[in-house]
Amino acid sequence: GTFPDNVIFVNMTRPWTGCKDAKTGEPKICRHIWEKMWQSWIYVKDHHLDQAEWFCKVDYDTYFFPENLQYYVRDVKNWDPYNEHHYFGTVLYHKGPRHPPFPAGAAACWSHKTMDGIAEVYRNMPKGYEGHDRMRCEDRPMASEEISTSMCLKLGLNVTAEPMVDDEMREYVMLDPYHNMLGWNRTEQGEWWFWKDKPANSGQMEDCCAIRPMGVHKYKHKGQITSLEEQFYGTVNNKFLNGLDARSRRYVDKVRKAMGIDQ
């Protein structure tokens, strides 16, 4: 098939064969997500570092609000992208004290200074190790991208992931469709991996999520994206808005008002 001009092909150091499905034991195509990411960030530094102040990794099924990223880094935090290290998203802590906290994969961003530095850490880190996690910044097979990124930032730059929450401890990046997260109750659910070791006052239920969200996750189909677009940016009382349940409508109305969609 054909690809757009902005699709870049980068040679991988690992083969695409030789992996097995963990459940069935059957052969499968190797994913090598960690190598894809560190190779990509080196490419970004070498070719695009001067084109942005902030750089983000966004999953393909995350609906991203770039204007709310700008709002957060400029209006809320007043961060200096060129002189300050920052790496942020919905931060998880469940791997325990041996691993640095890390943003979940839905969307995470870093400053120009961090982008510049981490690309050199990746360029110079050891390559070719074939074993399991040994708490080092290195290339290895089957490594988790988010955990490895945070390890390299901590060991290479002494940078720790910062939770992207508002002053009411509400998350800017939702890891599940927002209508689901609006129902997440920490007391009822218990300390599963999302809640484990998060601050006791972390937002939950209808107070889970910031009203200037940066990303909402797990929207994989075109129709879902179209629906989100209309919910958050469409005309007042369009069919996509009117079809929401009451709890979802209350949240979307808050977002639209905060973003100036509905004046």
Image (tube, rainbow, N blue to C red):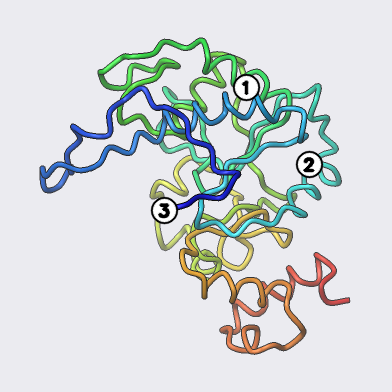
Indicate the secondary structure of the residue bearing disc 3.
Answer: loop
Q: Amino acid at mark 3?
A: Gly
Identify the residue under disc 3. Answer: 1
Identify the residue under disc 1. Answer: 159
Q: Name the residue at 61% across, 72% down.
A: 228
Indicate the secondary structure of the residue bearing disc 1.
Answer: loop
Q: Is residue 236 above or below residue 106?
A: below
Left or right of residue 208: residue 17: left
Q: Which mark is residue 73?
A: 2
Q: Name the residue at 41% across, 53% down.
A: 1
Q: Are marks 1 and 2 in contact (CB under 8 Å)?
A: no
- How far apart marks 3 and 1 lie (CA) works out to 41 Å
Q: Earlier in the sequence, mark 1 or mark 2?
A: 2
* Image x and y of residue 41, in percent: 57, 28
Res 143 → quadrant: top left
Q: Nearer the viewer, residue 120 or 200?
A: 120
Left or right of residue 42: residue 32: left
Q: Name the residue at 71% across, 27% down.
A: 49
Q: Nearer the viewer, residue 93 or 253?
A: 253
Q: Are marks 3 and 1 in contact (CB under 8 Å)?
A: no
